[in-house]
Image (cartoon, rainbow, N blue to C red):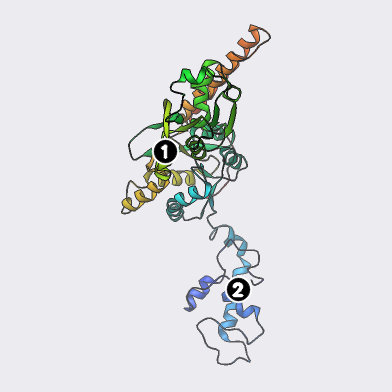
Amino acid sequence: MCDACHGRRNMPCIGTAYADRQGWGEMTPCAWLRCCDQPQGSGSVPGKRSADRSKPRRSQVAVWLAALLVLACLPLYATDAIKPSSSLTFGILPIGGPSESLDAWRPMLDDMGNALQRPIHSISVSTYEGLAQAMSEDRVDVAFVSGVIALDAVTRDRMQVIAQLTRGDGSHGYYSVLLVLKDSPIRTLDDLYSHPGHWRFARGESLSTSGYLVPETQLFASHKLDSDTFFASVQVNNHQNNALSVANGEVDVATNNTADLERFAQHFPEQYARLRILWKSTLIPHAVIIVRSDLSPQLRASIADFITHYAKVGPNVAAERAKLKLIHDISGFAPADDATLVPFADINYSLERRRALSAQWVNDAAMQARLQKIESDHQHLVRLLKANQPMDLPYRGDGP
């Protein structure tokens, strides 16, 4: 790289405009100044043949003069006229394995990058906690996440809901389930509850809505039980591995959800045939798309416009729908805001309240104080979510 362009990798080559006027065609960064890097008479302009290698050519002199003129006004030119569009990082809720999730989302993200005219990088980690940590460290600009992770990101990590997943079957959500073997002696929930310390259990991570929070709230906390102490053993893994554990007889019961079970049935039909659903929860709203609230308003609007119109309008609707189907039978994304997360705030509220009621307290006043704190915190959070106002944070200035 020549001295004139050294350290300026984020801007177009400063001689591009001059090269275009001379009819030299498209040139790689710094190629137009090769004559400056080489001994006098050894360089040549692409597409031109040198008639006299012993003297500088008139075209070379013209290039040098143009370079001096451009360098003289470079600070203004670099900050305004040729400021590049910075890349965005898209975080993906791990479904199956991280590499599988990345492959499934890549076609849509490529279209998104073309529409926004900026590179879209993607990350998918093996755990919910890993994705939450990436967002807390400001390593993610846009993300596809469950409602519970979104709630945490909105309240702590400067994120804002812009869209919610819609599925091809028209469903408004999915269900948490408990899985057992078809021939399991656990025929009812009473069979489960009547043998504490006996069954082997597999669940999702603590941030998993269907894998932990919903069954913990609706099945265990409601009976003043804690799943981590009720069972003989507890393993924590993703939905796919937990379903395999039940099918292979490694655990007696496991959490899962109806959406992931559909995918499991396609990839592991033999193992799926061994399973039976013991219990199904109330409806859980679909996952959402969140974006950093400190991105520029123009950029946030552009991202939301692309996502909510993708596979719905334009000449490429059929191709875009096929790309979405690769992800998880997604049909598109509907416009949404932070109020979409109120049901997930209610889940956390119910779990915290039931845990408080089942805990041991020094006196009733202490318990009542805790319950009042849980109630007031929940009401405050719901008001903030319904207001749909991003936190007052510094603007990153990423451009429109």
Of helix, strand and loop, which one carries label 1?
A: helix
Q: Which mark is residue 67?
A: 2
| Above or below, comparing residue 349 to residue 260 in the picture | above
Of helix, strand and loop, which one carries label 2?
A: helix
- Reading the image, the residue beneath label 1 is 272
Q: Quadrant of the N terminus?
A: bottom right
| Above or below, comparing residue 159 to residue 29 in the picture | above
**Residue 217, position as x, y percentages in the image:** 51, 22
| Along the line of sight, the residue nearer the viewer: 40 or 322 | 322
**Residue 314, position as x, y percentages in the image:** 32, 51
Q: In this view, does 309 lie to the left or right of 19?
A: left
Give the residue displayed 58% in from the left and 38% down from the top. Answer: 132
**Residue 271, position as x, y percentages in the image:** 44, 40
Question: Mark 1: which amino acid?
Answer: Tyr
Cα separation, mark 1 vs mark 2, equals: 68 Å
Is tag 1's residue or tag 2's residue first in the polypeptide sequence? 2
